[in-house]
Image (cartoon, rainbow, N blue to C red):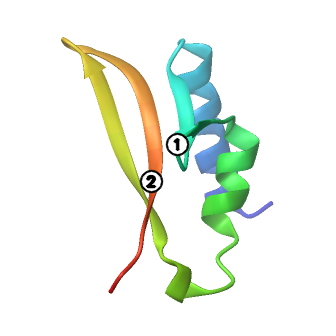
């Protein structure tokens, strides 16, 4: 695992441990699956993932990764 992948995985794991739910493409996910999806980009034409932070008041509740396709 590359340093950048390890950093991402640890960041996501920390968030999950704090009770923040993680989502990938509209489905609940986990640090491992998200790290793999974000770090393995075989075809840039398929787009990339953008973070979407979902708050309840001032508390972060969800971190969503949504695919964005460049038209």
Figure check: 44 above or below 66: below
Q: Quadrant of residue 70?
A: bottom left
Whether residues under marks 1 and 2 lie with C-beta atoms below 8 angstroms apart, the answer is yes
- The Cα atoms of the two marked residues, 1 and 2, are separated by 7 Å
Residue located at (69% from left, 83% from top): 42
Residue located at (44% from left, 34% from top): 63
State which tag comes first along the sequence, 1 or 2.
1
Q: Quadrant of residue 2?
A: bottom right
Figure check: 7 above or below 16: below
Residue 7 position in % (x across, y down): 61, 48
Furthest residue to the left?
57
Residue 20 position in % (x across, y down): 50, 19
Q: Which mark is residue 66?
A: 2
Q: In this image, 62 relative to 44: left or right?
A: left
Q: Quadrant of residue 13?
A: top right
Residue located at (55% from left, 37% from top): 23
Figure check: 8 above or below 68: above
Q: Which mark is residue 10?
A: none
Residue located at (75% from left, 43% from top): 32
Label 2 Cα neighbours within 10 Å, binned few <14 / some 14-19 / many ≥20: some
Depth check, front residue: 18 or 34? 34
Is label 2 in a helix, a strand or a loop? strand
Q: Which mark is residue 26?
A: 1
């Amino acid at each position: 695992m590359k340093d950048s992948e390890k950093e991402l995985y640890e960041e996501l794991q920390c968030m999950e441990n704090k009770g923040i739910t993680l989502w990938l493409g509209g489905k609940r996910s986990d640090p491992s699956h998200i790290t793999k999806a974000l770090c393995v980009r075989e075809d840039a034409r398929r787009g990339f993932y953008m973070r979407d932070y979902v708050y309840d008041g001032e508390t972060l509740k969800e971190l969503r990764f949504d695919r964005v396709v460049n038209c």
